[in-house]
Amino acid sequence: MSEEIRQRVLQLIKQRDKIEDDIKQLTEILTLNGVGMNDPLVDSEGFPINSIDVYQVRHARHRIICLQNDHKAIMKQIENGLQGYYSGSNDNQTNGIHDVEMKNNVEDHFVRHETPFAKITLVSPSSPAEIAGLCENDEIVEFGSVNSTNFKSVADVASVVQHSEGSEVIVKLKRGTRFRTVQLVPKKWHGRGLLGCNIDVLK
């Protein structure tokens, strides 16, 4: 049974990776059009803005919302599958070997990037960052499509935030020696900005 669960979880992880790649490509369409998920597509008189491909943006937004819902569901299935796998792996040696293989496979898929590029230095109470589970001293490994290989400045993160207002951003963190993934929704709240946290570049 454990082997069946293991194969199922790995298959779910592949599906999750495909969803994340699709969301990234669709988000790039919004970026090229200079809009996020909630920016207006028409001017004050109700006419389409010339610089925006309205049909393309509307289609991308719809697909992103659908994929984000799929992503939530699949992350829950992965979590449940992992719990089922480890609860079913008892103390014989074969299962111990499978545990190591499973751990390595899960880490390969969940943490495709392991080098942090920034650090959370402050999290405000009741902010979107706190609600998502971010903590002071967390190191950021991935923030949406931003990672150590393409990060240039905090402006890269700010751009993702701006174009993702009201939508989930997948954030991968390093906390101590462990990695974790959270879903952060940038949005207006009673404090400053859309996140409610300070992000500094790692020296």
Image: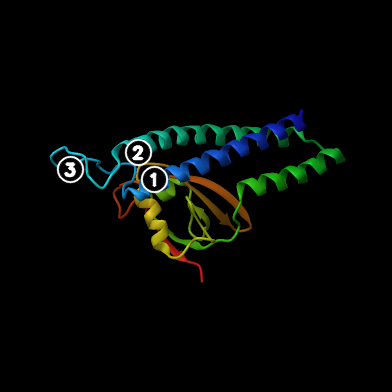
Q: Quadrant of the N terminus?
A: top right
Q: Which residue is label 1 attached to?
A: 29
Quote the CA–CA distance across marks 3 and 2: 17 Å
Residue 105 visible in image: yes
CB within 8 Å, label 1 to label 2: yes
Residue at 36% from the left image edge and 50% from the top image edge:
32
Question: Which amino acid does the dot numbered 1 rest on?
Answer: Ile
Question: Which amino acid does the dot numbered 3 rest on?
Answer: Asp
Q: Which residue is label 3 attached to?
A: 43
Q: Disc 3 vs disc 2: which is toward the camera?
A: 2
Relative to the observer, which residue lies in front, 37 or 186?
Answer: 37
Q: Residues within 10 Å of mark 1 (few under 14, many from 20)?
A: some
Residue 197 visible in image: no
Residue farthest top in this picture:
1
Residue at 38% from the left image edge and 51% from the top image edge:
161
Residue at 65% from the left image edge and 34% from the top image edge:
11
Q: Which residue is label 2 attached to?
A: 56
